[in-house]
Image (cartoon, coloured by chain):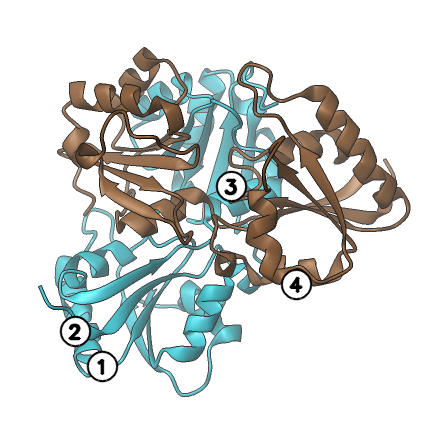
Chain colours: A brown, B cyan
Amino acid sequence: MTKKNATLYGLGIGPGDPELMTLKAHRLLQSVPVVAYPAPDTGDSLARAIAAPHLPDGLVEIVIKTPMTPGNFPANDIYDHYATEISVHLDAGRDVAVLCEGDPFLYGSFMYVFERLSGNYRTEVVPGVSSLGAVAAAAKWPLVSRNQILTILPAPLDEAVLERRLAETDAAAIMKVGRHLEKVKRVLKRLGLEENAQYIERASMADEKVSALKDVSADAAAPYFSMILVRQKDGAVT
Amino acid sequence: MTKKNATLYGLGIGPGDPELMTLKAHRLLQSVPVVAYPAPDTGDSLARAIAAPHLPDGLVEIVIKTPMTPGNFPANDIYDHYATEISVHLDAGRDVAVLCEGDPFLYGSFMYVFERLSGNYRTEVVPGVSSLGAVAAAAKWPLVSRNQILTILPAPLDEAVLERRLAETDAAAIMKVGRHLEKVKRVLKRLGLEENAQYIERASMADEKVSALKDVSADAAAPYFSMILVRQKDGAVT
């Protein structure tokens, strides 16, 4: 298939600190005429806020409004709509960079744009610093070494699934903790792992928060961008 | 405990492409007087090669020679030795940046320096783009979305362990493939997953190589820095 001339970039912009953007993402932001980024229905776009110090004036900006309704995600018609809007620019020969918090292909919404457009347009994915690395750095908590197994678990999973997977891995990162904090604490306590867990909010951002999980109240209001790192008791990293 | 004035940095410098270094790592490289980096017994340091375009003249360089002898890793006396060498600079008030391929806390050797020095010296970990993100970007292969589970498995693990973990995860990244290629191919074939796997060598580097795993011969010479990404057949990412 012949692909058109303009390039679609999936641009990893890192976990929150604008300085954790790569040199490559920074260079591309100075050269593309169009950027697109996800934003909640109401409120500001985190991706745009991360990139803001590096965005030149005069860019065309496409705000991908994505309602975060559980059970209705991804909203196919919404991504169809924005893919069309992006393709109009690509057809006109204008490169488009889709800003992605963290890394584009690790739980990122860029894949919904990617699957709609990469068949027809030249596409480049620029990896970014993931929240995983940022969280470990914030907590000063080495994740895994040598031949250890690391499991990445979204907190919304069923309690039984979480428990089974946590019981058998050397280390885990539990993402998207948010309103699932109480459930996760309960599971870890049952496994005898609560003492081996760290809780991290908004890693690398100005309001970053790190705490031993045992010191976090089960009814604390954890934001969506919070994570728990845990290691087996006998699984010393070194 | 009172910590001394100089800072030890664990500096994630990314997966290989020097442009995938963060702005922060780049800035710190212009300010520290001393860098340290791992290197094999014989041959060049990959970490130094990645950082080379960004290293100012006149830095003090500490080469952490680490023999990669299976079964004898980490070599405790070697890390004791280099930790002492690094601490001499920190005691004299000179910041030291330890260059880490990928991300410092994801299978990185920085943790051996960290565990020896972070109790006594101010330490900052700067996350970097991991090989995981670079590999997914190279293969144009979204890793996981929504509530999918991602398991990171070192290929040297026992065949039975690999098989059990691969059977029950939505997606996996199998690291350090190297001489374990034949074993991993055998396991994936048995699970009916070989068709759903990508093989990637030296992601983001000049000699990057991406191939469907089924097209890679089981007796191909895979380098240590090779990875296999795999998804369940019924686990479409989107």
User: Where does label 4 land, which residue?
Assistant: A27
Q: Amino acid at mark 3?
A: Ala
Residue B4: mark in rendering:
2
Regarding mark 1 in the picture, which secondary structure is present there?
Answer: loop
User: Where does label 3 land, which residue?
Assistant: B220
Q: Residues under labels 4 and 3: Cα distance?
A: 37 Å
Question: Does residue A8 appear to the left or right of A100 in the view shown?
Answer: right
Answer with mark 2 or mark 3, whichever residue precedes in sequence. 2
Q: Residues under labels 2 and 3: Cα distance?
A: 50 Å
Q: Give the foreground label among 4 and 3.
A: 4
Residue B199: mark in rendering:
none
Q: Residues within 10 Å of mark 3 (few under 14, many from 20)?
A: few
Q: Position of residue B231 (x, y in %)?
A: 52, 24
Q: Residues within 10 Å of mark 2 (few under 14, many from 20)?
A: few
Residue at 70%, 30% (x, y): give it. Answer: A115
Regarding mark 4 in the picture, which secondary structure is present there?
Answer: helix
Q: Give the foreground label among 2 and 3.
A: 2
Please report contact status of discs 2 and 1: CB closer than 8 Å, yes or no.
Answer: yes
Pointer 4 and pointer 1 on the same chain: no
Quarter of the figure with residue B158: top left
Answer with mark 1 or mark 3, whichever residue precedes in sequence. 1
Answer with mark 2 or mark 1, whichever residue precedes in sequence. 2
Q: Residues under labels 1 and 3: Cα distance?
A: 49 Å
**Chain letter of the residue beneath label 1 in the structure image:** B
Does any portion of residue B107 appear in the rendered image? no
Pointer 1 and pointer 3 on the same chain: yes
Q: Is residue A152 above or below residue B4?
A: above
Q: Position of residue B223 (x, y in %)?
A: 46, 49
Q: Amino acid at mark 2?
A: Lys
Q: Amino acid at mark 1?
A: Gly
Q: Residues within 10 Å of mark 4 (few under 14, many from 20)?
A: few
User: Where does label 1 land, which residue?
Assistant: B93
